Image (cartoon, helix red, strand yellow):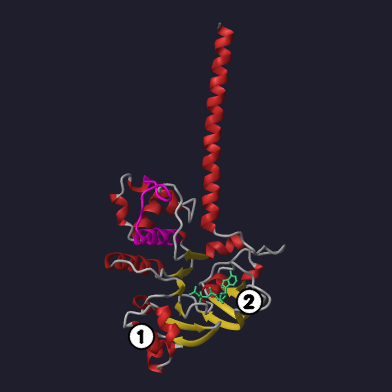
């Protein structure tokens, strides 16, 4: 009886362990899948054998005679020159297909350029290790991907070694006060099957991640979707906190944020057609000024630019 019951116990115990292991494995696999989803598509760039780590300086970005296309037949950028000084805040505007996203992707080295160089703090992006470059640049995408994990883990994703206190501070700085009203505060599960967050709340989680990362350069793809006035104000406040004292390269879609930038660069067909402060561009009375006038009639920046160029 003892032998049989021991055997039965072992089998049951073993199967429980097996079941636990399977549950654990499922959790790990889903975490890996979610991570890949957040990181985005597989990187097509590879580190050179003698790739160097990025040396943090002020946070400048320079495009030097850059030519790049997604296929060999058509270059999106050709001999493209562009520079953002350390600490400068530059907003990129342009009609759809102008190359705005391509520009901010190349600044992050999501692709390698065909010819020319992208220099981050004077160092050619192609010659740096991708891992070190990731620490130099905090990205706030248009659509924030959230894991089915706690709010705490979702924010900490930007800097896994951050303490709870650092995560709370970043959330506070990013105006994520709504977290206090969630059922379990920072322990509340969000994401696919968790608490549903509004568009403005998701954006602020994205901004909290970027604040936590504490990188010298912020790359921002401003959301096109309109938010209610209260969320709009909170997101703007969070962005002001994030961008303070950092270099900013942003694809700007909203008139309300344009005045926050030191410089606006108007791109059309892979070329810079206007470049200056809002005031300078208004005085120049070109495409930007036409866009501004159209936009005040309620047309989006991109659509208005499409009509203005
Ligand atoms: P939008 O405001 O619509 O996002 P954009 O100004 O950001 O436009 P890009 O997305 O940079 O423009 O696109 C520039 C050009 O490159 C377009 O002609 C586009 O069709 C093309 N393009 C962009 N991404 C890819 C890709 N992954 N593969 C092939 N062509 C692409």
> Which of the two residues, 299 or 94, is positioned nearer the viewer here?
299
Q: From what the image shows, is residue 196 above or below residue 112?
A: above
* Image vertical order of residue 209 relative to residue 22, above or below: below
Q: Callout 2: 10 Å neighbours few (<14), some, many (20+)?
A: many
Residue 299: x, y in percent? 36, 80
Question: Residue lying farthest bottom?
Answer: 284
> In x, y percent, where is residue 53?
62, 63
Disc 2: which residue: 68
Q: For the point 67% across and 75% down, which residue is it?
A: 114
Could you tell me which secondary element the residue under label 2 belongs to? strand
* Element class at badge 1: helix
One can see residue 163 in this view: no
Q: Residue sitting at 54 percent across and 67 percent down?
A: 56
Quarter, ligand 1:
bottom right
In the image, residue 282 lies at what x, y percent? 38, 90
Q: Is residue 32 left or right of residue 284?
A: right
Please determine whether, in this image, residue 131 is positioned above or below residue 70. above
């Amino acid at each position: 009886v003892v032998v049989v019951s021991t055997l039965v116990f072992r089998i049951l115990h073993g199967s429980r362990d097996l079941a636990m292991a399977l549950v654990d494995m499922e959790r790990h696999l889903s975490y890996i899948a979610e991570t890949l989803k957040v990181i985005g598509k597989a990187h097509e760039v590879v580190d050179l054998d003698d790739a160097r780590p990025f040396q943090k300086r002020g946070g400048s970005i320079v495009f030097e005679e850059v030519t790049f296309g997604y296929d060999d037949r058509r270059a999106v950028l050709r001999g493209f020159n562009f520079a953002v000084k350390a600490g400068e805040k530059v907003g990129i505007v342009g009609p759809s297909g102008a190359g705005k996203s391509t520009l901010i992707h190349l600044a992050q080295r999501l692709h390698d350029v065909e010819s020319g160089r992208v220099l981050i703090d004077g160092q050619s992006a192609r010659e740096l290790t991708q891992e070190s470059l990731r620490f130099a640049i905090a990205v706030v995408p248009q659509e924030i991907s959230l894991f089915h994990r706690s709010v705490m883990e979702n924010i900490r994703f930007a800097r896994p070694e951050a303490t709870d206190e650092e995560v709370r501070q970043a959330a506070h700085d990013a105006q994520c006060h709504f977290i206090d009203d969630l059922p379990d505060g920072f322990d509340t599960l969000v994401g696919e099957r968790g608490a549903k967050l509004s568009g403005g709340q998701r954006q602020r989680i994205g901004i909290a991640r970027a604040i936590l990362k504490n990188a010298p350069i912020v790359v921002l793809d401003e959301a096109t979707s309109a938010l209610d006035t209260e969320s709009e104000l909170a997101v703007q406040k969070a962005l002001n906190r994030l961008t303070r004292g950092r270099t900013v390269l942003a694809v700007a879609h909203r008139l309300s944020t344009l005045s926050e930038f030191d410089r606006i660069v108007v791109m059309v067909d892979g070329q810079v057609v206007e470049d200056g402060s809002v005031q300078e561009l208004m005085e120049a009375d070109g495409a930007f000024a036409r866009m501004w006038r159209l936009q005040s009639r309620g047309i989006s920046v991109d659509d208005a630019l499409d009509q203005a160029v």
